[in-house]
Image (cartoon, rainbow, N blue to C red):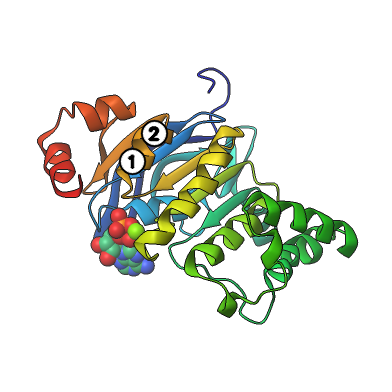
Amino acid sequence: MTTTGVPMVHAEGVTKRFGPLEVLKGIDLTVAPGEVSCLLGPSGSGKSTFLRCINHLERIDGGQLSVDGELVGYRRQGDKLHELKAREVARRRRDIGMVFQRFNLFPHLTALGNVIEAPVRVLGTPREKARAEALRLLDRVGLAEKAGNYPGQLSGGQQQRVAIARALAMHPKLMLFDEPTSALDPELVGEVLDVMKGLAADGMTMVVVTHEMGFAREVADSVAFLDGGVVVEAGTPAEVLGSPRHDRTRAFLDKVL
Ligand code: ADP
Ligand code: MG
């Protein structure tokens, strides 16, 4: 983890409202390249909305948000800001992989087909090359033997690992995970967390919304606790999970631990 240089994610006073409802009320968060940052917080605290802002799926209303030094949604020219065109947004989004609670695989494509889809269609990677790399990625998530299976023939944990391989096929510089194990049967959670641990060990920059405290404690470099649309408390896992300073953090941890 580096502490100097350009942050991979930098949020300063980020606000977001849906109509009259202010969901993000000034989020401050910095994630360095190579860092694993876990976001914790009660349901409705704004965790998913914040990830969606990072990934250009929601537009922020105020504050500043940048990924790898580039403002999300805008291009700077001199001292002027220009809104990004859809094509530029699409290009920036390619660098960000996202894994959701629900696996969202294409049901009519095999595991292999799911992984090669975007490289072939979006990046124009030759099919054979994409195929070779997809097989390597499926092997990395422990699913080399399942390349020919359709999602309906895979367990939830296996589907989620395919979803991770699919995201990796775009060579993202940042991976966002939104409760990737929340929809899984308990016995399948470990295999997905193990793949994520492997990614972390390989130096991938990751922002992970999770209720898996063991993962946060073991793998995260930093933990941020969100409540009511703000980061209430952030620090190392030992600080935030071991000796929380705020009542709201303590109350939350008492419930989930
Ligand atoms: P979390 O992921 O922490 O559970 P969310 O970011 O999903 O929280 O939601 C935060 C709040 O924003 C909730 O009150 C939710 O109902 C509201 N919200 C999220 N998305 C929308 C939307 N598209 N339109 C209106 N309200 C939304
Ligand atoms: Mg959520």
Q: Name the residue under label 1.
A: 214
Q: Identify the residue shown where x is 61% and y is 62%.
A: 162
Q: In this view, does 99 lie to the left or right of 23?
A: right
Cα distance between the residues tagged 2 and 1: 6 Å
Q: Nearer the viewer, residue 24 or 240?
A: 240
Secondary structure of residue under mark 1: helix
Crowd around label 1: few <14 · some 14–19 · many ≥20 (10 Å) = few
| 255 is higher (above) or lower (below) than 114 | above
Secondary structure of residue under mark 2: helix
Residue 142 appears at what percent x and percent y? 63, 54
Residue 215 appears at what percent x and percent y? 38, 41
Location of the C terminus (image quadrant): top left
Q: Which amino acid does label 1 sit on?
A: Gly
Q: Mark 2 points at which residue?
A: 218
Q: Which amino acid does label 2 sit on?
A: Glu
Residue 255 appears at what percent x and percent y? 14, 49
Q: Residue 51 carries which label?
A: none
